[in-house]
Amino acid sequence: MEVDVLIPVYRPDGKLTELLKRLKMQNYPIHRVILMNTEEKHFPTELTGIWDRVEVYHLAKEEFDHGGTRDRGVRMSTADLVLCMTQDAMPADETLIEELVKPFDDSEVWAAYARQLPNEDCREVEKYTRSFNYPEQSMVKTKEDLDRLGIKTFFCSNVCAAWRREKYLELGGFVKHTIFNEDMILAGTMIKQGGKIAYCAKAKVIHSHNYSAFQQFHRNFDLAVSQTMYPEVFGGIRSESEGIKLVKKSLSYCIKIGKPWLMIQVVTQSAGKLLGYKMGQRYRSLPMWLILRCTMSPSFWRGGKA
C-alpha cells in the first residue's frame, strides 16, 4: 500500500527536523510528506532540503483549522493510506510505518493509530496516564465494543493515525470547522458505519505533555465542546466511566511506587479535567466572555466558526 504522511506545521523547530529524518529512515517506503504550514514567514526553507519527498503548502493563520487544514492535505494525497502526525511526535524506531500498515490487510479496518510513549521529561503521573491510554496490547475496535468501552471505542489520535483514504473520502473526511477532536469525530463515524479502528501497540511514537491542572481544564472544555457539537456521533455514548477508572488506578499507582504525595497531583489534575468537561458540555448556556476564558482555542470562537 502506498503511504503519504501529512503534518500540520506551525513555527517548526529542531523537532520537525528530527521527525523528518526519522521518517526518511523508515523501513517501509513513504511516497510523500505533505507539510501544511501556517504562516510562511516562520518556515525555515532549509527543511525542504532534508528529503526530496517533502512538499510544503503555506496558509495564513486565519485559514488554519484542526479539521479543515488536515482535510485539505488528505485531498492532495493520492496514496492508499494517509498518515496524520503532529510536528512533535517522534517515531520511536524504524518500523512505525510498517506496523501501522499491517492492520489494513483487513479491508474493514479504516483507520489505525500508534502507541504514544512518554518523553524523558514526562512527569510520573502522566507516564502512567500514557500507559493507561496506550497499553502494550494491540486491539481492533468495532461497534460491538460500544457497550464495553463506551466512548473509548471511538478513540483515535491524529498525533499518529493512518486513514484509509478511499473510506475517508466516502465518509466526507474530517469536519471542516472544529475546535479540535477531528480524529475522534471521524473515527466515531467510521465505527457507526461498520468500520474498524485498529490500535497498533507495536507502532510507537514518543509524545507527551506535562499539562497543569488549568491546562487540563482548558483542554477538556474544548473536548466536551467538540463532542457536544456532534450529538449524531457522541450522543448516548457512555463517556465518563473510563475517566473514573483512570483516577482510581492512578491513585493506586502512586501508592504502589511509594510516592503517595503524587496523589495530590492526580486529584488536582482530575478535578481540572472534570470541571472543564462539565462546563464544555454546557457551553451553549455560557456567555461568550466566559467561554473565551475556558477554551484553549479562542480563535475558533472569534472566527465565527462555532
Image (cartoon, rainbow, N blue to C red):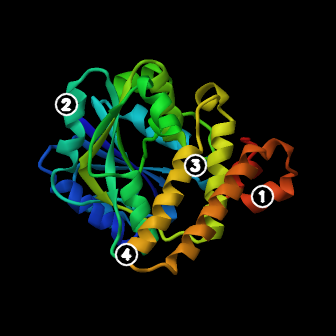
Give residue 158's position: percent from left, percent from top. 42, 46
Q: Secondary structure at mark 3?
A: loop
Give the Cα distance between marks 2 and 1.
44 Å
* Residue 215 sits in quarter: bottom right
Nearer-the-camera pick, 246 or 103: 246
The residue type indicated by label 3 comes to: Phe
Nearest to the observer: residue 93 or residue 200: 200
Q: Gap in Å between the C-alphas at discs 4 and 3?
A: 43 Å
Q: Determine whether 91 is above or below 173 in the image.
A: below
Q: Is residue 112 visible?
A: yes
10 Å crowding of disc 4: few (<14), some (14-19), many (20+):
few
Disc 2 vs disc 1: which is toward the camera? 1
Q: Position of residue 227 (x, y in %)?
A: 63, 39
Q: Which is in the foreground here, disc 4 or disc 3?
A: 4
Badge 4 is on which residue?
Answer: 257
Distance in Å between CA atoms under marks 4 and 2:
44 Å
Residue 249 in the image: x percent, y percent? Answer: 46, 59
Q: Residues within 10 Å of mark 2 (few under 14, many from 20)?
A: few
Q: Are marks 4 and 3 in contact (CB under 8 Å)?
A: no
Name the residue that disc number 2 marks.
1
Q: Residue 211, position in %: x, y? A: 54, 69
Answer above or below: position of 256 versus 143: below
The quadrant the N terminus occupies is top left
Residue drawn at 37 percent across, 75 percent down = 257
Q: Look at the numbered discs 4 and 1 and tell me whether their residues touch, using CB distance below 8 Å.
A: no
**As drawn, 35 above or below 294:** above
> Is the residue marked by circle 3 packed among few (<14), some (14-19), or many (20+) residues within 10 Å?
many
Which residue, given by chain and number where applicable, does mark 3 sit on?
A: 64
**Which of pointers 4 and 3 lies earlier in the amino acid sequence?**
3
Residue 297, visible in the rendered structure: no
**Residue at image point 51% right, 35% down:** 150
